[in-house]
């Protein structure tokens, strides 16, 4: 990770701040994570509607070049994002502290510089769902096999977990490179 330079698109986890503090790393927010907070609050239809408008426009940019996409974003997406930020700031004082809605507002306001940074370059995506969907099976397997092995034969516990990790690495690498693991 020391050699990484470029855009880092992440959720609001504070541990990413250390990486993003480097001069050669530009942190980006994830609109899917911000949207999920409002969805979980179950009382923010207006926020969800505005985020949906942003995503509708994103579907329009899919086939554009980076330059065309940036121009489209400037004309269509930026005004929606600006309206969303204005709405957040206007409504925030009326939200009950510590409620799920307050948590959604606080998350979006704290992440705003990074959510808005997506407009800086036409190559950038609104969220990191593509990669999260690719690694989800690996993360689920890692949790499912946390205590892999036989408790009655403790000397094999580490070896079973190591074998599972090796298989996940092999299968994940095959999937990422579109290689049939059976071949």
Image (cartoon, grey):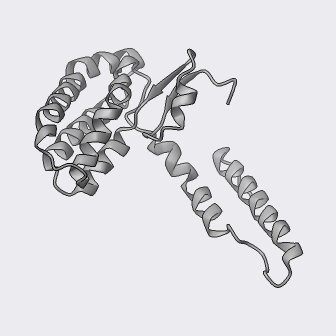
The quadrant of the rendering that contains the C terminus is bottom right
Of 9 and 91, the residue lying toward us: 91
* Residue 136 pos. (x, y %): 54, 55
Q: Residue at x 82, y 66 (%)?
A: 158
Q: Residue at x 57, y 19 (%)?
A: 22
Does residue 8 appear left or right of residue 91 in this picture? right
On screen, residue 46 above or below 182: above
- Residue located farthest toward the right when viewing the structure as drawn: 155
Q: Residue at x 15, y 46 (%)?
A: 95
On screen, residue 153 above or below 83: below
* Residue 116 pos. (x, y %): 32, 25
* Residue 21 pos. (x, y %): 53, 22
Number of numbered discs visible in the structure rendering: 0
Q: Residue at x 25, y 54 (%)?
A: 100
Of 78 and 148, the residue lying toward us: 148
| Residue 119 falls in image quadrant | top left
Of 135 and 2, the residue lying toward us: 2
- Residue 32 in view: yes
- Residue 183 in view: no
The quadrant of the rendering that contains the N terminus is top right
Of 113 and 122, the residue lying toward us: 113
* Residue 104 pos. (x, y %): 27, 46
């Amino acid at each position: 990770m020391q050699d990484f330079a470029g855009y880092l698109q992440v959720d609001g986890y504070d541990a990413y701040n250390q990486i993003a503090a480097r001069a050669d790393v530009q942190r980006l927010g994830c609109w899917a994570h911000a949207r999920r907070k409002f969805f979980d609050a179950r009382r923010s239809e207006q926020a969800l509607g505005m985020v949906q408008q942003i995503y509708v426009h994103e579907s329009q940019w899919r086939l554009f070049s980076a330059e065309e996409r940036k121009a489209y974003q400037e004309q269509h997406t930026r005004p929606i994002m600006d309206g969303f930020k204005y709405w957040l700031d206007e409504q925030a004082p009326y939200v009950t502290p510590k409620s799920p809605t307050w948590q959604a507002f606080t998350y979006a306001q704290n992440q705003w510089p990074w959510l808005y940074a997506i407009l800086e370059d036409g190559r950038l995506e609104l969220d990191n769902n593509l990669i999260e969907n690719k690694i989800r099976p690996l993360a689920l397997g890692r949790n499912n096999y946390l205590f892999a092995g036989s408790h009655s034969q403790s000397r094999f516990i580490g070896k079973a977990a190591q074998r599972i990790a090796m298989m996940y690495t092999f299968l994940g690498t095959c999937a990422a490179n579109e290689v049939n693991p059976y071949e």
